[in-house]
Amino acid sequence: MRKVTVIGAGAVGASCAEYIAIKNFAAEVVLLDIKEGFAEGKAMDLMQTASLNGFDTKVTGVTNDYSKTAGSDVCVITSGIARKPGMSRDELLGINASIVKSVSASLVEHSPNTIIIVVSNPMDTMTYLVHKTTGLPKNRIIGMGGALDSARFKYRLAEALGAPISDVDGMVIGGHSDKGMVPLTRLATRNSVPVSEFLSEERLNQVKEDTKVGGATLTKLLGTSAWYAPGAAVSGLVQAIICDQKKIYPCSALLEGEYGLSDLCIGVPVVLGKDGIEKIVEINLNDAEKEHLAASAAAVKTNNGNLEL
Ligand code: 2OP
C-alpha cells in the first residue's frame, strides 16, 4: 500500500503531492497533467527539496501517460478548472464533469483496485459521477470537502476563542458549497469543553457563516481557488488510507439510507482506513442540523440531475 497518483499538477495537486512527500508515508507519488512537461517540472522541483525537507518519497511527473499510474493504491483527482471570484463551485459542473469522467475511467483501467479521492468541483456531484462511471465499490470512492471545511471551521473557532488551533476541534458535514455546509457548532470543543461555554450564539453564527464562505473568501483575495489547505486536507485522507489509521473524517460518501438520505454523495463522518470508507458514522443530529443537512442534500441532488450520465 505505497503508491499514490495525483491527477492535476496545478496548485492543489502539487500541494497535495508536496504534503504527501514531506509526510513520508508513501514510497511513490506519480503526478500527472495534460500540459506537456508541467507535471515533470513540478515533480523535479519537489524532489529537489527532498534533502531539505528530509523525505525519501519518490515523486515523478508524467504528461498524460496513465500507464505510469498503474498499480496505484490511492488516486487523487484534482483536475478541472478552478472557480474565479464571484463564481460558485456549481458553475464548474459542465466542464469538470467530462474531465473527471475521462480521468476516472483511465485511472481504473490501470489500477482496478485503487481507491479514488475526488477533489474537483462541484465535488459532491463529481464524486457521484465517479460512482456512476466507474462502478467501483462504494467504499473506494471518497470526496474531499469536509476535511477542508472543518479545517477552516477550526481556524475560525480558534480566531473567535483566541485559542491555539491545537486546542480546538470541530466538524463540518453536508455539501461542499457556500450554502450547503453544516458546521456543527453544537459539537465543537475547546480542549473537550463545548465552545458554547466561551462564545455567544451570535458569535458562533458568525463563525458558521465565515466557515461556509471560506473558499469564496480566499478566491476573492487570490483571484483563484485556494491550494495549501485543500492540498493538506486531501493528503490527510491519503495518509489515513495508506497507513490504515481508522481516523474519522467528514467525507463525501455515497449514502444508501444513512441520515435518511439515498442516491447521492454528501459530507458525513466516515472511518477511513486501508479499505477506504470502512464505516459511515451516523451521529445524532438535532432537528436544526437535520434540516440543514436535508436542504444541503436537496441542492446536491439538483446538481446531480444536471449530469449527463
Ligand atoms: C475550496 O473550497 C477548492 O473547493 C475548494 O477551496
Image (cartoon, grey):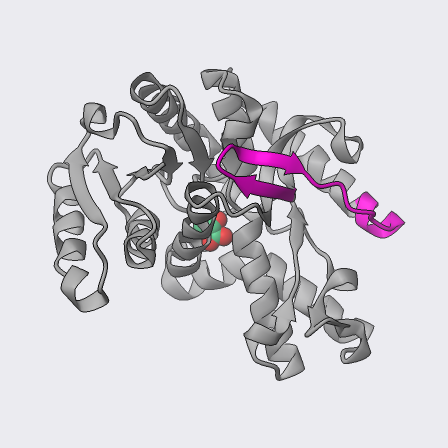
- Give coordinates of residue 54: x percent, y percent: 22, 64
Left or right of residue 308, residue 182 in this image? right
| Highlighted range, magenta | 269-291
Asked whether residue 286 is drawn in magenta, I would say yes
Q: Is residue 195 visible?
A: yes
Left or right of residue 118, residue 205 in this image? right
Decide: is 300 above or below 147: above
- Total labels: the figure holds 0
- Give coordinates of residue 40: x percent, y percent: 13, 43
Asked whether residue 222 is drawn in magenta, I would say no
Q: Residue at x 52, y 54 (%)?
A: 148
- Give coordinates of residue 303: x percent, y percent: 60, 30
Question: Residue reaching furthest bottom?
Answer: 162
Left or right of residue 300, residue 298 in this image? right
Pick whichever, 126 or 197, lies toward us. 197
The quarter of the image holding the N terminus is top left
Pick whichever, 277 or 223, lies toward us. 277
Image quadrant assignment for residue 226: bottom left
Image quadrant assignment for residue 201: bottom right
Decide: is 84 above or below 272: below
- Give coordinates of residue 16: x percent, y percent: 34, 51
Left or right of residue 198, residue 155 in this image? left
Pick whichever, 72 or 121, lies toward us. 72
Q: Is residue 213 visible?
A: no
Q: Residue at x 17, y 60 (%)?
A: 50
